[in-house]
Image (cartoon, coloured by chain):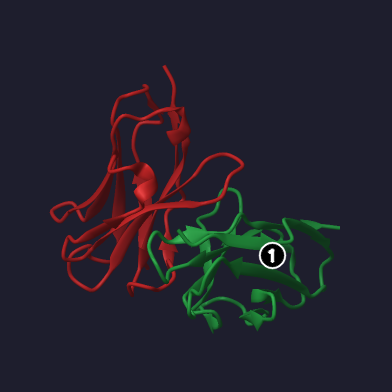
Chain colours: A red, B green
């Protein structure tokens, strides 16, 4: 059974860097053809896709974060990482990691999400 | 970016009802449309992918399709666990985008 679990600091100060990890069990982040995405949802708003990394390490991102986001893999820990630089209050959201098995497929496994608040 | 619009924003229904949720894209997304169920305290759940393919393990009362107004998610014989918020997502052209959601509430 594939399981994803996000973790990271719940509170980040403005202009600092937000760093989250997604621990993956039941699947390898590097062996197999998987796409690992990060999605976020501010309170009362729609889901927003941030970016994804393929098993090979290739990435694509949403232009909305203006190159502030980086998605990467840690093969030794079987984890997916997200960093967002220069955060503001607008980055306050529940952050999810998720997996898809094809480039245009649905996201078949998600984590429970982790709330990140940007505040001084 | 492709804009996704869902309707209605919310609806009230009873157990046993049949409900139809609609999602419209601002441009063609081919067949690359998925539906998700979000419930508080639960991981989001993929219901339908590629417009009409039922994700493994999802009850057959959920079905996806198309209509004159766009893409549809039909829930037949609504069950207590189905009261939730539903989102559509296109994965045709990045950035993948979601609709604003439809909340299905108890009447």
Q: Secondary structure at mark 1?
A: helix
Q: Position of residue B47 (x, y in %)?
A: 55, 72
Q: Residue at x 62, y 68 (%)?
A: B24
Q: Horizontal placement of A42 versus A11: left or right?
A: right
Q: Residue at x 79, y 75 (%)?
A: B18
Q: Horizontal placement of B26 versus B10: left or right?
A: left
Q: Position of residue B84 (x, y in %)?
A: 67, 58
Q: How many marks?
A: 1
Residue B62 visible in rendering: yes
Q: Position of residue A48 (x, y in %)?
A: 47, 51
Q: Horizontal placement of A36 versus B28: left or right?
A: left
A24 shown above or below B55: above
Q: Nearer the viewer, residue A29 or B1?
A: B1
Label 1 marks a residue whose chain is B
Image quarter hosting the C terminus of chain B: bottom right
- What residue does disc 1 label? B82
Residue A26 visible in rendering: no
Q: Residue A11 occupies which quadrant of the picture?
A: top left
Q: Residue at x 45, y 29 (%)?
A: A117
Q: Residue at x 77, y 76 (%)?
A: B77
Task: Determine the residue located farthest toward the top in the rendered image.
Answer: A120
């Amino acid at each position: 059974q594939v399981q994803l679990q996000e973790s990271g600091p719940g509170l980040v100060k403005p202009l600092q860097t937000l760093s989250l990890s997604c621990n993956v069990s039941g699947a390898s982040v590097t062996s197999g053809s998987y796409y690992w995405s990060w999605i976020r949802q501010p309170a009362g708003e729609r889901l927003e896709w941030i970016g994804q990394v393929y098993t090979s390490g290739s990435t694509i991102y949403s232009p909305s974060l203006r190159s502030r986001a980086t998605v990467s893999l840690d093969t030794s820990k079987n984890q997916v990482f997200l960093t967002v630089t220069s955060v503001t209050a607008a980055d306050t959201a529940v952050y999810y990691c998720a997996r898809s098995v094809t480039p245009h497929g649905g996201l078949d496994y998600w984590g429970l999400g982790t709330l990140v608040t940007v505040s001084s | 970016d492709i804009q996704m619009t869902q309707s209605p924003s919310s609806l009230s229904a009873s157990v046993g009802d049949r409900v139809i949720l609609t999602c419209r894209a601002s441009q063609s997304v081919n067949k690359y449309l998925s539906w998700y169920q979000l419930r508080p305290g639960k991981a989001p759940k993929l219901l339908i992918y590629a417009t009409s393919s039922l994700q493994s393990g999802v009850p057959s009362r959920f079905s996806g399709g198309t209509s004159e107004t766009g893409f549809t998610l039909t829930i037949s014989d609504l069950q207590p666990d189905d009261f939730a918020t539903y989102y559509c997502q296109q994965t045709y052209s990045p950035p993948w985008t979601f609709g604003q959601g439809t909340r299905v509430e108890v009447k």
